[in-house]
């Protein structure tokens, strides 16, 4: 039995619909499996679950679609999942756990979407491996072993510390070339150019890699079994803070029209959505819904209702 069995049972009574508070969840009829539990935190980080943002604490359970962000001085944030996978985040990193819309046919949902920053993804030492991470620049349909990735607006790099992985280049939500990586190989890509694979990681990559990524740390999920933690509530993120997510690739941003629709009632948030509509056009029918057909018919002149309005008879 994986060590997360008890935390998973607790999350079923703790994280249901994103907008509900944890204390009310036990009475709700629907529950979801957790995406993971925070087992190590060195520094500050935040988690946005539904529309509620909190500071991250060790022992905190995180639901699918949780957006986790670390600060500039964060040394390490580790999230462990129910299948034994460990997700390590470095400083200035933004990820979404279990992002919907990215599961290939017949495969599981990736454990995380990396918008930017440093990630170390460690699959269990035994078994068939996992579906790896996905980012704007690459996806990993399969991974066995340990992969370290860095992602920013200009490109990405992946160092396969151990094991083997399949990597698919991506751009604008579309897939490109498929590459195979094996133990110690290094993939680097700049912008729209195709990436290249070399036998070893570049010295620059190794020098910049977070120091905590160089150690093999034991799993700690079992330490938090039966514990209850209460993260500190934080202010809701502004449009500017959410904009990199709202303006992401289509599969990433489409669910946000439901998730953040309540924020559209806020004048500043709505104004920013309208001003930046080109970055997320799916918000247009949400902010400016079409007039109901019944209302159109009620306003039409007698004898010219419905589809005949303006055409005569």
Image (tube, grey):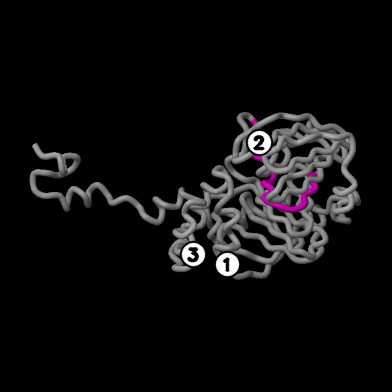
Q: Nearer the viewer, mark 3 or mark 1?
A: 3
Q: Verify whether residue 61 appears in magenta.
A: no
The residues bearing labels 3 and 1 have C-alpha atoms spaced at a distance of: 11 Å
Mark nearer the N terminus (2 vs 1): 2
**In the picture provided, is 194 more to the left or to the right than 210?**
left
Residue positioned 70% across, 52% down in the render: 116
Mark 3 crowdedness (10 Å alpha carbons): few <14, some 14-19, many ≥20: some
Give the percent coordinates (x, y) of residue 99: 62, 45
The front one of 99 and 135 is 135
At mark 2, the secondary structure is: loop
Q: Which numbered circle lies on residue 236?
A: 1
List the residue tagged with mark 3. 269
Mark nearer the N terminus (3 vs 1): 1
Residue positioned 14% across, 39% down in the render: 311
Find the magenta span and give its range. Answer: 107-121
List the residue tagged with mark 2. 108
The residues bearing labels 2 and 1 have C-alpha atoms spaced at a distance of: 31 Å
**In the picture provided, is 259 more to the left or to the right than 224?**
left
Residue positioned 54% across, 49% down in the render: 30
The front one of 264 and 173 is 173
Q: Tell me whether the residue at label 2 lies in contact with that at label 3, contact meaning CB atoms closer than 8 angstroms.
A: no
């Amino acid at each position: 039995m994986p060590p997360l069995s008890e935390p998973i049972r607790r999350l079923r009574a703790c994280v249901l619909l994103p907008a509900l508070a944890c204390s009310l969840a036990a009475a709700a009829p629907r529950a979801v499996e957790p995406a993971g539990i925070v087992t190590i935190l060195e520094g500050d980080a935040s988690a946005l679950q539904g529309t509620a943002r909190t500071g991250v604490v060790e022992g905190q359970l995180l639901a699918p679609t949780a957006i986790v962000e670390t600060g500039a001085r964060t040394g390490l944030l580790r999230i462990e999942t129910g299948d034994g996978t460990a997700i390590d985040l470095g400083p200035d990193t933004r990820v979404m756990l279990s992002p919907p819309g990215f599961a290939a046919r017949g495969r599981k949902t990736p454990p995380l979407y990396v918008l930017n920053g440093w990630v170390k993804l460690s699959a269990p030492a035994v078994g068939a491996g996992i579906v790896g991470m996905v980012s704007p620049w690459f996806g990993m349909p399969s991974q066995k072993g340990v992969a370290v990735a860095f992602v920013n607006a200009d490109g990405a790099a992946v160092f396969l510390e151990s094991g083997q992985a399949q990597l698919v280049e991506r751009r604008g939500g579309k897939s490109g070339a498929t590459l195979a990586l094996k133990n110690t190989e290094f993939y680097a890509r700049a912008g729209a150019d195709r990436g290249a694979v070399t036998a070893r990681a570049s010295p620059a990559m190794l020098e910049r890699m977070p120091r905590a990524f160089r150690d093999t740390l034991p799993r700690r999920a079992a330490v938090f079994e039966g514990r209850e933690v209460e993260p500190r509530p934080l202010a809701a993120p502004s449009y500017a803070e959410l904009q990199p997510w709202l303006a992401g690739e289509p599969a990433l941003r489409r669910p946000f029209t439901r998730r953040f629709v309540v924020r559209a009632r806020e004048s500043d948030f709505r104004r920013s959505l309208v001003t930046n509509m080109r970055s997320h056009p799916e918000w247009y029918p949400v902010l400016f819904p079409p007039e109901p057909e019944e209302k159109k018919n009620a306003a039409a002149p007698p004898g010219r209702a419905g589809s005949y309005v303006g055409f005569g008879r």
